[in-house]
Image (cartoon, rainbow, N blue to C red):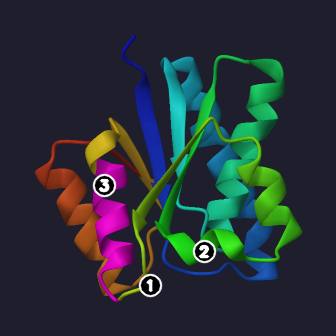
Amino acid sequence: MHLKTCCMICNRKISDQEANLITQKIRTEIKSAFKKGFTHFISSFEEDIDLLFADLVIELMDEYPNIVLEAGISYSKKIETSDIYFHRLLSKCKVIGITSLYKTAGCFVKRNRLMVNFSHMVIVINDDFIETAEIINFAKSQNKKLILI
């Protein structure tokens, strides 16, 4: 069976002032994607927003058990973190992909490109980072549905 896949990419942390608004926007986009038939969601499992995205997908999993959460981990040592929240979320993943053995400058870009390649839709927290502009352009070049927050 071919699953419709959605990933989210963000290159920054969010402030406490932004947290509620960004959370609501991401939740809305996840629910909208699910209503459009998306059942496979990929999170990079980096900090802040990426973990929030995974957590919000897990909320839906309680209601809709056919949803698949995938962790797109940039490098293998990332899994050795002592962060309990990270491991709680990771335990809910049905798929865990690791892009690189070692943390390198290119492992994050490689992971993001893989996430976009495997997705039909890409949610991006739009900011002023060059990396974000590059991934937006890459998603457009791959004709992916792009949701900008």
Question: Could you give the CA–CA distance between mark 1 and mark 3, rounded to whole angstroms?
Answer: 16 Å
* Residue carrying label 1: 103
- Closer mark to the observer between disc 2 and disc 3: 2
Q: Looking at the magenta stretch, what is its main secondary structure?
A: helix
Where residue 21 sits: x, y (%)?
73, 61
Q: Mark 2 and mark 1 in contact? Answer it, CB < 8 Å.
A: yes
User: What residue is drawn where x is 28% and y is 74%?
Assistant: 133
Q: Amino acid at mark 1?
A: Lys
* 56 falls in the magenta region: no
- The label nearer to you, 1 versus 3, is 1
Residue marked by disc 2:
78
Q: Nearer the viewer, residue 120 or 117?
A: 117
Dot 2 and dot 3 residues touching (CB under 8 Å)? no
Asked if 17 appears above or below 53 in the picture, the reply is below
Q: In what quadrant of the picture does the N terminus appear?
A: top left
Q: Position of residue 56 (x, y in %)?
A: 74, 45
22 and 42: which one is in front? 42
Q: Earlier in the sequence, mark 2 or mark 1?
A: 2
Question: Helix, strand or loop at disc 3?
Answer: helix
Q: Secondary structure at mark 2?
A: helix
* Span highlighted in magenta in the image: 105-116
What is the C-alpha distance between the residues marked 2 and 1? Answer: 8 Å
Q: Which residue is mark 3?
A: 114
Residue 55 spot, x, y in % from top left: 76, 50
Q: Earlier in the sequence, mark 1 or mark 3?
A: 1
Q: Position of residue 16 (x, y in %)?
A: 81, 80
Q: Mark 3 packing: few (<14 Cα in 10 Å), some, or many (20+)? A: some
Please tell me which residue is depicted at 45% across the width and 39% down the height of the picture. 6
Q: Residue at x 44, y 69 (%)?
A: 126
Identify the element where label 1 is drawn: loop
| 37 relative to 68, above or below | above
